[in-house]
Image (tube, coloured by chain):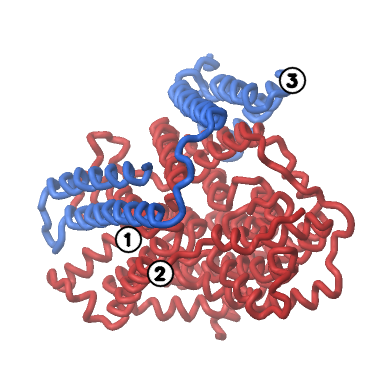
């Protein structure tokens, strides 16, 4: 099922990309092709890959139906719950990381990184919270020194800026 | 031949400076450590560490990044043998006999034979690289835009056709990479393309955010799932950490055969270490007098594929240095690093940057010796990295990836883009879409477009220019055959081969 959905998305994306490519300016002074031909060719490749994927998925489905009976599509309730739990954790991780990136400059590298890493460690490494705080502080300090002193990168000071 | 001798002697002087020696050691050490971390392969490792090399001398930086790459390939066997999980995709064949050997209490023998195979194959591979790269570069100097275009199309078709277990998904990944490369200002007309009005996209999508997102951040998601499942089981190294004379007698011919297979596969664009290891394993089983032992702990089943993987690494550098075409996902990332330092790999590199090319090749001889010295006596010590808490590791990787990406342009937009590509990489894994073709597309996209437009301009818009040159026509015919073969042939992936050969070990 996932491959069917993917092939639909790819074909739709390829059509949009092809339209965008063909809408580019056709100015081609001293250039036989101009800026739109290569993207248009890539769009055609994308379109072909989407159609080929649909064909591959259809073939697989035919072979499965002709051969051994397909495995039970319904997963046991426990496995489903576990899978949903894992997905929720990953979504929360992405949201937490996005929040960290938004806070990176206004709050500053040191404070935002300490909070970000500590929270993740509390969840993924369930030992004494002080140990996790120590890991977060040590990582932040080493990375800060490495990038600012050794690599001469200016990391944002944020709220620590006096 | 004489040029190669002069070159390598000059290179040894460059690689032998204290700074370069120190960074070679650091690179191979980091590579070995990374290979011991389940889930983090060479591509993610190199991607994470590229930002740390900014500001360094490019020769030193590339020596270190190459060290990470072959250090990773060298050590990939450790996780394959001890936890039945390859440290990098190429070590997948090593699990078939390596893990059963470990379960029989012979982990030390398997690890030491893997280290010895890697050393011999690595040294033979670098020697071949030394004498093959310069003549290939000389030949490539005669290539025009049409030949270059066809060569890159051949590389893309090979990687699309042979990576993963679906031609459609390989092609999708490559096309997506090419589409990403078209974002930003068009170099010839100066027009913006597909930037959606976002000023930060005018310079294009940075290669660094793509690799960090797709490889490092997506791998973190995989590690997070593994941590939640708590499914990792390892065999501890105990007893004798050396192989027997009997083992050596069986392994040595396998190492030589594996080295030859690996170097030839590495020299072909897109084949990569996994295919080298698969071919070597099949070859060893075919020539063995006791094929029934394969899958139950045959030492040749460890020696051959390990040698192939390490020789493949050297073969891949022939392409990268002499033609400017990557041969695998990891060399595509190293090529991206070259471009980020303002160096264009390719035939002219041997003339314009002899210090860099020969210094890099010479450092691989030195690095191989360092790896042997590091790995043989310290294999038990390194294996302890395996027992590092995965929860801490994944958090540290997120931390390094974030600060590394930000430091590239000190622009938060890079962070958002990397996160987006992390999500894309996660879906790639879930949907079994290979990642290497995407990186090939991103790296080669603008070069392919430039070659296409130059060739068409020089021929006044005659598309037959690609068929008029015999070399270009041959490469295009090979590219088409590669895709056609992949379309009709029944694929046998490393995973299916592994399942077919692996025996349940009690």
Both on one chain, marks 2 and 3?
no
Badge 3 marks a residue whose secondary structure is: loop
On the image, which quarter does residue B445 sit in? bottom left
Q: Which mark is residue B186?
A: none
On the image, which quarter does residue B452 sit in? bottom left
Rendered shade, chain A? blue
Residue at mark 1 to residue at mark 2: CA–CA distance: 31 Å
Q: Residues within 10 Å of mark 3 (few under 14, many from 20)?
A: few
Q: Position of residue B418 (x, y in %)?
A: 43, 38
Residue at mark 2 to residue at mark 3: CA–CA distance: 55 Å
Visible residue check, residue B283: yes
Label 3 resides on the chain identified as A
Q: In percent of the image, x 46 and y 57: which residue is there?
A: B164
Residue for badge 1: B447
Both on one chain, marks 1 and 3?
no
Of all residues, the one furthest to the bottom in this rendering is B1
Residue for badge 2: B489
- The reply to whether the C-beta atoms of the residues labelled 1 and 3 are less than 8 Å apart is no
Q: Position of residue B430 (x, y in %)?
A: 46, 43
Q: Position of residue B276 (x, y in %)?
A: 56, 69
Left of B268 or right of it: where is B244? Answer: right
Label 1 resides on the chain identified as B
- Viewer-nearest of labels 1 and 2? 2
Does B400 sit above or below residue B187?
A: above
Q: Which mark is residue A128?
A: 3
Rendered shade, chain B? red
Left of B279 or right of it: where is B256? Answer: right
Q: In percent of the image, x 77 and y 45: which residue is there?
A: B384
Q: Nearer the viewer, residue B110 or B368?
A: B110
Q: Residues within 10 Å of mark 2 (few under 14, many from 20)?
A: few
Visible residue check, residue B9: no
């Amino acid at each position: 099922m996932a491959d069917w959905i993917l092939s639909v998305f790819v074909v739709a994306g390829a059509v949009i990309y092809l339209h965008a490519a063909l809408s580019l300016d056709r100015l081609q002074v001293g250039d036989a092709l101009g800026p739109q031909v290569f993207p248009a060719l890539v769009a055609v490749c994308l379109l072909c890959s989407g159609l080929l994927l649909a064909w591959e998925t259809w073939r697989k489905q035919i072979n499965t139906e002709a051969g051994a009976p397909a495995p039970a599509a319904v997963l046991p309730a426990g496995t489903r719950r576990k899978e949903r739990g894992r997905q929720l954790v990953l979504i929360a991780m992405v949201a937490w990381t996005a929040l960290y990136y938004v806070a990176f400059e206004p709050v500053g590298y040191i404070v935002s990184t300490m909070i970000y890493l500590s929270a993740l460690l509390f969840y993924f490494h369930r030992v004494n919270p002080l140990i996790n705080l120590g890991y977060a502080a040590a990582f932040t300090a080493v990375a800060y020194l490495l990038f600012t002193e050794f690599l001469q990168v200016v990391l944002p000071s944020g709220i620590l800026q006096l | 031949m004489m040029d190669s001798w002069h070159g390598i002697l000059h290179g040894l002087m460059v690689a032998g400076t204290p700074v370069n020696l120190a960074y070679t050691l650091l690179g191979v050490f980091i590579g070995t450590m990374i290979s011991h971390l389940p889930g983090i392969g060479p591509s993610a490792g190199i991607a994470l560490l590229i930002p740390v090399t900014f500001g360094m001398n490019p020769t030193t930086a590339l020596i270190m990044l190459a060290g990470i790459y072959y250090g990773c390939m060298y050590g990939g066997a450790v996780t394959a043998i001890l936890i039945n999980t390859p440290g990098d995709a190429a070590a997948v064949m090593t699990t078939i006999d390596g893990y059963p050997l470990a379960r029989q209490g012979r982990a030390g023998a398997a690890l030491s034979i893997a280290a010895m195979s890697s050393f011999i194959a690595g040294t033979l591979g670098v020697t071949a690289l030394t004498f093959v790269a310069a003549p290939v570069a000389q030949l490539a100097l005669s290539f025009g835009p049409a030949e270059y275009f066809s060569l890159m199309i051949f590389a893309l078709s090979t990687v699309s056709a042979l990576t993963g277990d679906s031609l459609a998904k390989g092609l999708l990944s490559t096309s997506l990479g090419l589409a990403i490369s078209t974002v930003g200002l068009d170099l010839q007309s100066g027009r913006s393309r597909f930037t959606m009005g976002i000023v930060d996209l005018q310079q294009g999508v940075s290669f660094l955010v793509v690799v960090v997102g797709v490889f490092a951040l997506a791998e973190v998601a995989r590690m997070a799932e593994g941590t939640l499942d708590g499914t990792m089981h390892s065999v501890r190294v105990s007893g004798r950490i050396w192989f027997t004379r009997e083992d050596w007698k069986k392994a040595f011919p396998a190492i030589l055969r594996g080295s030859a297979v690996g170097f030839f596969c590495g020299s072909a664009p897109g084949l990569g270490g996994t295919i080298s290891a698969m071919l070597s394993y099949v070859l060893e089983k075919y020539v063995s007098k006791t094929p029934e032992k394969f899958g139950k702990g045959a030492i040749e089943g460890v020696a051959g594929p390990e040698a192939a993987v390490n020789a493949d690494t050297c073969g891949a550098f022939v392409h990268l240095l002499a033609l400017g075409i990557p041969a695998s996902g990891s060399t595509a990332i190293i090529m991206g690093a070259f471009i980020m330092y303002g160096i264009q790999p390719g035939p002219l590199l041997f003339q314009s940057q002899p210090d860099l090319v020969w210094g890099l090749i010479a450092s691989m001889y030195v690095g191989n010796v360092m790896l042997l010295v590091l790995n043989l006596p310290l294999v038990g010590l390194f294996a302890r990295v395996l027992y590092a808490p995965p929860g801490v590791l994944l958090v540290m990787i997120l931390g390094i990836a974030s600060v590394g990406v930000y430091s590239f342009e000190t622009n938060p937009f890079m962070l958002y883009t990397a996160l987006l590509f992390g999500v894309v990489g996660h879906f790639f894994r879930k949907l079994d879409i290979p990642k290497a073709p995407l990186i090939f597309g991103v790296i080669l996209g603008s070069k392919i477009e430039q070659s296409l437009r130059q060739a068409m301009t020089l021929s006044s818009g005659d598309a037959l220019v690609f068929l008029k040159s015999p070399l270009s026509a041959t490469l295009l015919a090979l590219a088409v055959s590669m895709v056609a073969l992949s379309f009709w042939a029944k694929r046998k992936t490393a995973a299916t081969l592994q399942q077919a050969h692996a025996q349940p070990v009690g």
